[in-house]
Image (spheres, rainbow, N blue to C red):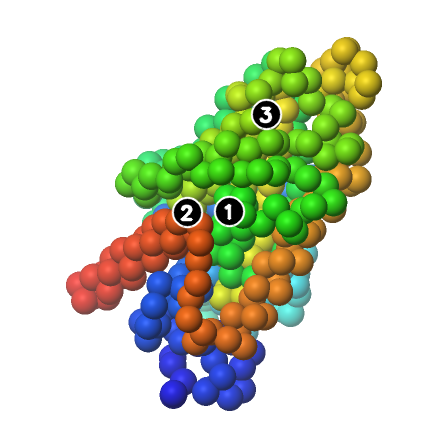
Amino acid sequence: MTGAAGAVPGFTGAQDAPPGFEEAGNLRQKVRAAGMDPNYWYAVEEAHRIKPGTVVEVVFWKRSIALFRAADGSFHAMDNRCAHRQLKLSLGVVEGCRLVCAYHGWKYDKDGNLAETDHERIGKGFPNVRLRTYPVSVRYGLVWVFPGDPEQAEVRRIPEIPELEGPGRWACVPLSFTWSAHHSMVIDNVSDFTHAYLHRRYRPFVGAKLTRCETVGDDVHLAYDTQVGRGRISGLFVDRNRVDTNFMELCYQYPYQWSNTDDAIKHWLFVLPVDERTTRAFFLFYFKSLKIPLLPVHIPRFAMTTVLKISNRMLIGPLLAQDGFAVEAEQEGYEQHWNARPIEFNPVVRAFQNVTVRKWQEHLARENGRADAGD
């Protein structure tokens, strides 16, 4: 077996490397090498983590982007490189509404134009330099970047979550993780309820029976008859006299994922594909209401955010950490045994993988078409 171009980084022996997308021999190998279509909005960071006057690096499928927050609080994104010596601009500083390279002090405005330098260009006029910029938006406590064709940014919108809008919005406190695993493993995990054993301590769902699995366009719709929130702690907060927690709808709405339990308990997952073995995952769990444990009284709306912050730290965070452990271990297993025969019992996983592979193939075809046209 010979190595393949585009194989997973970090392997020194070509024989040991999983194949690249074009060389993959089966669906599992293809999906584990696939990127994601850049013509969507991707969550890249929690907004509160980026203070005015700071810059961070975010990565979308091996593309480094400098995300900075100007002194006026506005967010901007551009290629993470100074046009002069190619240093990452995320190593620099923010001055007012400009991003400044750490090496020679070249200053870029929010539109990516070189606006000022601290030295003259000897014997010549000021250089005309412009870096690529990316549309940026802030919604639901997250910063979103559109890494694809900017003309598509108005067509492909950030998902609408009406429960998180307006004065009567539900309580929600985002959680984010960086996991050493391919994005498809994360998507497989969150909608495959056959892994209840992993969560036997917290029991977020038990006795799951798949009742629907249907691919409609780029979406995979599924449903489970399952007992949700039956853990010793989580079960105390759910008012089962008002909420039916025995049924859950889910959807892989490429490239996002969501779930709905009786229109009362919902969540979204937004993945940021970094490379073949790294993914950032942003979770939004939100609840219409929760009750005070052991009492038939609901937690006041003004206290819900505080309750969720505690829940994230004590319950939801540790629960998701178990998923992180699993997908990182799966990544290691795949890298060592990528040529093992695929065995999968849950049809939803194959459905997810088919959509991911098809969307990546469509993206590559568009890119090849532009290259052939000389764009």
> Residue 226 location in percent, x, y?
55, 33
Quickly name the residue at label 2: 348
Tag 1: residue type? Asp
Q: Residue 86 vs residue 362: left or right? A: right
The residue lying toward the viewer, choosing from 180 and 195, is: 195
> Residue 98 location in percent, x, y?
59, 50
Residue in view at x 62 percent, y 65 percent: 329
The residue lying toward the viewer, choosing from 253 and 261, is: 261
The residue lying toward the viewer, choosing from 154 and 120, is: 154
Q: N-terminal of the two: label 1 or label 3?
A: 1
Q: Residue 375 vs residue 5: left or right? A: left
The quadrant the C terminus occupies is: bottom left
Q: Is residue 209 visible?
A: yes
**How far apart are the alpha carbons under marks 3 and 2?**
21 Å
User: Residue 192, which numbered label?
Assistant: 1
Q: Quadrant of residue 93?
A: bottom right
The quadrant the N terminus occupies is: bottom left
Residue in view at x 73 percent, y 31 percent: 234
At numbered mark 2, what does the secondary structure look like: helix, strand or loop?
A: helix
> Residue 176 location in percent, x, y?
65, 46
Q: Is residue 115 visible?
A: no
Tag 2: residue type? Val
Decide: marks 1, 2 in contact (CB < 8 A)? yes
> Residue 162 location in percent, x, y?
50, 22
Quickly name the residue at label 3: 245
Tag 3: residue type? Thr
Going by the picture, which residue comes out furthest to the left?
373
